[in-house]
Amino acid sequence: MNILITGATSGIGQQLARDYAAAGHHVVACGRNEQALATLHNEYPEHIAGQPLDIADADATQRALSTYTNIDLVILAAGVCEYLDVEHFDAALFQRVFDVNVIGTMRCVEALLPQLSKGSTLVLVGSTARLLPFTRAEAYGASKAAVHYIAASLRIDLAKRGIEVLHVSPGFVETPMTAQNDFEMPMQVSVETASKAIRRGIAKGTFDITFPRLFGLILKFASRLPQRWQQAFSRRLS
Ligand SMILES: NC(=O)c1ccc[n+]([C@@H]2O[C@H](COP(=O)([O-])OP(=O)(O)OC[C@H]3O[C@@H](n4cnc5c(N)ncnc54)[C@H](OP(=O)(O)O)[C@@H]3O)[C@@H](O)[C@H]2O)c1
């Protein structure tokens, strides 16, 4: 398969790039960190090509991604997380998070969609954070709720073109993103485990690839409780 991955310079996306390359697939690895792109290419010179990409830059994203044809699988994993300090409410924080997680991801879809053909798969990486109102996660959780909604709607609209849309809801994964967290992260998994769960879910065509399974089941159950119970549940976690 020809696979294009954003967020391939770190964490989950990087592990996916390595694992797909090791399995013999051809990967276009995207991100801003050119050193990390070069390292990936040097590890798998036949199987990974680096594509410098800043998805916060609309024109550059269009220029970089619209040249790719014959892509079978697109995984849009680039993302950022910033937590809100409610005592210093900062609307610009929402703008930064949404500009990468939501608008930036849609910039990639806009640039790639015309070249995607019947039988291809588009995967948007969200988060289980979308399921419950976690403390300080106003911007991040809302951005990931938007990504999930977009994936579910796109799945309907792109089915007509034979393009399958999938969504990923990771729990806590050990990456540079979570290394900044100063709170307990229950059931955290390694990037290797995350990559395996995502690749398996994509191979099966699961719409919402949620892992670890038990963590996802607990949050999905909690998300169906009345709002005041959800609030109590989240307060206990914080
Ligand atoms: N780790 C978790 O526990 C967890 C849980 C749920 C969901 N997720 C989601 O999984 C995805 C990957 O997260 P991760 O934990 O692997 O994070 P990470 O290690 O911090 O990696 C984030 C990736 O996003 C890329 N990125 C950020 N801003 C970008 C921009 N403006 N343009 C292009 N690329 C950009 C980074 O590349 P450059 O810096 O090179 O540009 C990097 O490759 C994210 O969407 C995240 O929200 C993670």
Image (cartoon, helix red, strand yellow):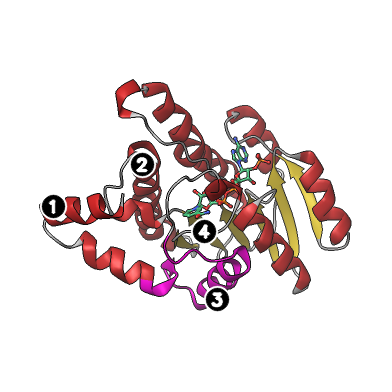
Q: Cα distance, mark 4 to mark 1?
A: 30 Å
Disc 2 is placed on an element classified as loop
Of tags 4 and 2, the one toward the viewer is: 2
The region drawn magenta spans: 186-214
Disc 3 is placed on an element classified as helix
The vertical placement of 213 against 120, above or below, is below
The tag earlier along the polypeptide, 4 or 2, is: 4
Q: Residues within 10 Å of mark 4 (few under 14, many from 20)?
A: many
Residue drawn where x is 68% and y is 38% of the image: 53
Residue drawn where x is 37% and y is 74% of the image: 214
Q: Is residue 150 visible?
A: yes
Q: Mark 4 sits on what residue?
A: 123
Of tags 3 and 1, the one toward the viewer is: 1
The vertical placement of 111 against 162, above or below, is above
Residue drawn where x is 39% and y is 47% of the image: 144
Q: Mark 1 sits on what residue?
A: 227
Do residues under tags 3 and 4 come within 8 Å of each other at their CB atoms?
A: no
Give the side of residue 221 with respect to residue 130, left or right.
left
For the residue pair 47 and 128, the one nearer the viewer reads as 128
Of tags 3 and 4, the one toward the viewer is: 3
Amino acid carrying label 1: it is: Gln
For the residue pair 154 and 82, the one nearer the viewer reads as 82
- Which quadrant holds residue 57? top right
Q: Mark 2 sits on what residue?
A: 137
Q: Is mark 4 within 8 Å of ligand 1?
A: no
The mark found on residue 98 in the picture is none
The tag earlier along the polypeptide, 4 or 1, is: 4
